[in-house]
Image (cartoon, grey):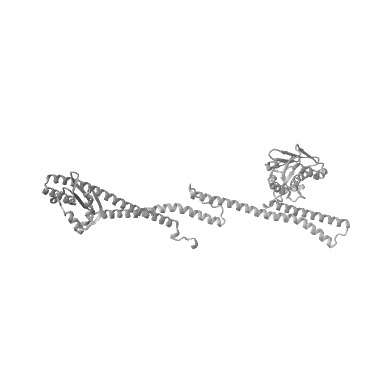
Amino acid sequence: MSKENKVRIYNRLFFKLYINYAVMLLVTAVLICLIFMKLYMDMTMERSLEELENQAQVVSEITQEYIISGKVNAFKNDIGRLEMVNDWDIWIVSNPMAANPMSYEMETSNTYEDFKAIPELSEYVELLDTTFNGQPVRREKYFDQIDERETIAVAYPIKINNEVVGTVIVKQPFEGQPEIVSNSLYLIVLSSVVALGISFIIVIIFATELSLPISRMRVTALELAAGNYKIKTGINRNDEIGDLAKTVDILSEKLLENEIERQKLDQMRLDFFANVSHELRTPITVIRAYAETLADGVVQDPGTVEQYYNRMLTECKSMERLVGDLLTLSKMQNPDFAIEKEPVNVRQIFDDIIRSAGAIAKKKNISIELVNDDPVLMMLGDYDRLRQMFMVILDNAIKFSEENKTVHINLSKSDKIIVSIKDEGIGIAPADLENIFEKFYKSNLRQNESGTGLGLAIAKQIALKHDGKIEVYSTPGEGTEFIFYFPPYELEAQ
């Protein structure tokens, strides 16, 4: 492979697939990590606050019982054990605004006035004021200036006879969560690395399934560009790549067909030039020979001189007819050549050509019978071209018929206009039947000696220009029938 066909690694399909897949995987992992941390922190915070609020309510109920019983020492001992066991800070604060506030002896921390006076405690004043109004309060994670650590707190009112006589504040350190998050991030990163490794293998397999058929199609395309139209991709898949491969194979088949057709056309062109050269060589040779004889004065007899001139004139007419037929055939075979069509009566055409062919038929005592029940058979066409076409067939029918025979012409109409010209002549051999419409094709019969071999080729092209079709049936020794089919004018008008 040349340097121009080499592809850099970052331009290869595998590299692009892997990069896209890896970026997608990493983005997904980061999103999952962020969502996980957010959900984990929110759920952990909510659960911790709910548990702490339940405990604060229990402490509030226990405090109510001790207020009623008045056992201050026992109360403080129980609160101390709760703090020790659960790693809590429990503050019992009396409500100075109550009509019957709880005893200040039961307070386990500073008084309300201390909270308001001490800067480190002032941030809890809002909690106290809210609970003094009878509402429990939660405080999510914050930095406690006293303990100097992340903390959560819940304040719960203490009620006696529906009066808030104090408040319970339960604080709990909210630590250990960063370690959990860090461990989770580690697991997510590790799983992402493993996933990238696995994805590398998956992408190799996936890219191979894509790149191999694409490379094979590329090689096929290069072979097609080099002229090897027999090559095929050999890919059989039921997906878009398979469809593309089938399209390349179809292209290969079409190019092969076009190449074969081109070769045929080239051969036809060579044959055409060879045939034209052959057809022109004989009359030119004859004319030159007679002209040189006359110019050299070899022939002096007036009768012989006149005979030479007549032969030269005959050969010139033959060449003129050949050139005219070639020009006509060239026009007919040109796809851009359009015939000017007008409504034409087929019966009128045959009345015309029968009169013209009558003199030829009379020499051989051949009769021409026309069968037609409808005097008007209209079609769209060029009168002169149609007359030329039918005249070629009728002339051949007379030429290849023995004396005292009949040529039968039948005109009819169904969904098509049908023209049948049948002779009782020598017929056409099966080997020749499939070639009679080829240019310059002539059998070895003596009747073809004066022909150019272009008449039937011209007739076929005229029929095609009129959207017609020709069928030929022949039996050697019995005769030949040409059948024409043309669309009628009434159908075209509809």
Q: Above or below — where is 93 with respect to 300?
A: above
Q: Is residue 486 above or below residue 255?
A: above
Instruction: Farthest residue to the right: give it.
Output: 302
386, 438: nearer the viewer: 386
Residue 223 or residue 20, whichever sits in front: 20
Looking at the image, the residue that sits furthest to the front is 99
**Is 81 positioned to the left or the right of 331 in the image?**
left
x and y, in percent, of residue 56 in the image: 20, 48
Total tally of numbered discs in the picture: 0
Q: Is residue 34 visible?
A: yes
As drawn, 298 above or below 239 = below
Question: Which of the two residues, 27 or 136, is positioned nearer the viewer here?
Answer: 136
Q: Quadrant of residue 269?
A: bottom right
Position of residue 462 in the picture relative to residue 20 (left or right) = right
Q: Quadrant of the C terminus?
A: top right
**Residue at left 84%, top 60%?**
294
User: From what the image shows, is residue 435 above or below residue 147?
Assistant: above
Query: In the visual, does 33 lie left or right of 441?
Result: left
Q: Can residue 400 be seen at all in this image of the molecule?
A: no
Residue 61 at x, y percent in the picture: 18, 45
Coordinates of residue 164 in the picture (x, y in percent): 19, 47
Residue located at (14% from left, 46% from top): 67
Displayed quadrant of residue 25: bottom left
Of residue 136 and residue 28, the one placed in the foreground of this image is 136
Could you tell me residue 484's position as x and y percent?
71, 42
At x 50% / y 62%, what residue is drawn? 4
